[in-house]
Amino acid sequence: MNPILFGLVAGTSFGLVAVGSMLPMQFQDKPVALAAAFCSRFAIGFLIPLCKLPLPPAVTGVVVALLVSLPDAIITKAYAPILGLGITGGAVIGWLAGRYVA
């Protein structure tokens, strides 16, 4: 599959999963929090298939996810949920990209 198309699908899917997981939570400005989470997770899904690192695909996904997720985790001080979801999603997207991206 084309890496850009894969990235668009993976980013949109991961963004929607992140937003869905945040819907029951309370935030001071919920629409802004949901939009920020979607954009961050979309970036992870979009960038992973486009990055060519000398690492296994799943590890590349973890590295990209960690780099994109870390600023959000530092700002919110919610390290475990943000980094946990980011790293898990990054590993899965990286693995899938390794299998299906030409």
Image (cartoon, helix red, strand yellow):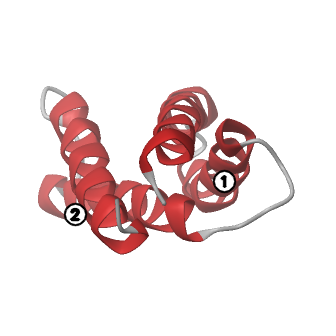
Relative to 46, is 60 on the left or the right?
right
Write the residue at 53% across / 49% down: 76
The extreme right residue here reads 54
Where does label 1 land, which residue? 70
15 w.r.t. 5: above or below:
above
Along the line of sight, the residue nearer the viewer: 99 or 83 = 99
Disc 2 marks which amino acid?
Ala
74 w.r.t. 47: above or below:
above
Write the residue at 46% across / 55% down: 101
The answer to whether residue 77 is seen in the rendering is yes
Where does label 2 land, which residue? 35
The answer to which of marks 2 and 1 sits earlier in the sequence is 2
Write the residue at 29% across / 40% down: 18
The extreme front residue here reads 102
15 w.r.t. 23: above or below:
below
The answer to whether residue 36 is seen in the rendering is no
Q: Residues within 10 Å of mark 2 (few under 14, many from 20)?
A: few
Relative to 24, is 50 on the left or the right?
right
Write the residue at 71% across / 50% down: 60
When asked about the image quadrant of residue 50, the answer is bottom right
Q: Mark 2: which secondary structure?
A: helix
Residue 70 x, y percent position in the rendering: 66, 53
Along the line of sight, the residue nearer the viewer: 13 or 57 = 57
Along the line of sight, the residue nearer the viewer: 5 or 85 = 5
Relative to 3, is 47 on the left or the right?
right
Q: Mark 1: which secondary structure?
A: helix
Residue 46 x, y percent position in the rendering: 41, 65
Residue 81 x, y percent position in the rendering: 50, 29
Relative to 19, is 58 on the left or the right?
right
